[in-house]
Amino acid sequence: MASGGRRVRLGIVLAASCLALCCAREPRHVAVTWTIEPTPALAGSATLVRAELKHDDGTPASGAKLRIEAHMTHPGMAPVTGEIVERANGAYEARLNLSMAGRWVIVVAGDLQGGGRLVKETEVTAVQPSG
């Protein structure tokens, strides 16, 4: 009879484990709306990048721990990084100094509050030479 009790307990543990895995919350999808000032961006000048993060239901994705990088679209250039801070509920901004004219890709990546990862990018197609 003891082995029958162990089987029941084992069955309960397995059922509970399956239920926990099946009901685990997936991270919510987050959309990013970008604004970049000035437009067009100027090489060698401060470029203000704003990223507004919202969940699918329209609520702001606040409290994220993010990093921002800008990459030239051709190889051989080191990425440009900056500090990104949350200025308002789900509204983040950073200043970057894009060092050369041309095409750049800006990437925001990090951890969302409550779990989940975010990696979003936007292309800045025409950084202009300064002067």
Image (cartoon, helix red, strand yellow):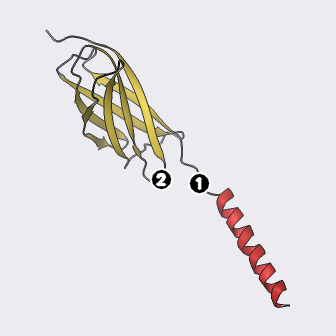
* Residue 96, picture quadrant: top left
Q: Hey, which quadrant is residue 101 in on the image?
A: top left
Task: Answer left or right for 107 relative to 24.
Answer: left
Q: Are marks 2 and 1 in contact (CB under 8 Å)?
A: yes
> Taking 16 as reference, is 67 above or below it?
above
Three-letter amino acid code of the residue under disc 2: Gly
| Quadrant position of residue 24 | bottom right
Q: Residue at x 24, y 11 (%)?
A: 128
Say which amino acid is labelled 1: Arg
The residue to which callout 2 is attached is 115
**Residue 19 coordinates in the image, percent (x, y):** 70, 63
Q: Which mark, residue 94?
A: none
Position of the C terminus by quadrant: top left
Work out which quarter of the rendered image holds the N terminus and state it.
bottom right
Q: Which sits in the foreground, 64 or 57? A: 64
Residue 27 drawn above or below residue 75: below
Q: Residues within 10 Å of mark 2 (few under 14, many from 20)?
A: few
Q: Which residue is mark 1?
A: 25
Q: Of the residues under marks 2 and 1, which one precedes in the sequence? A: 1
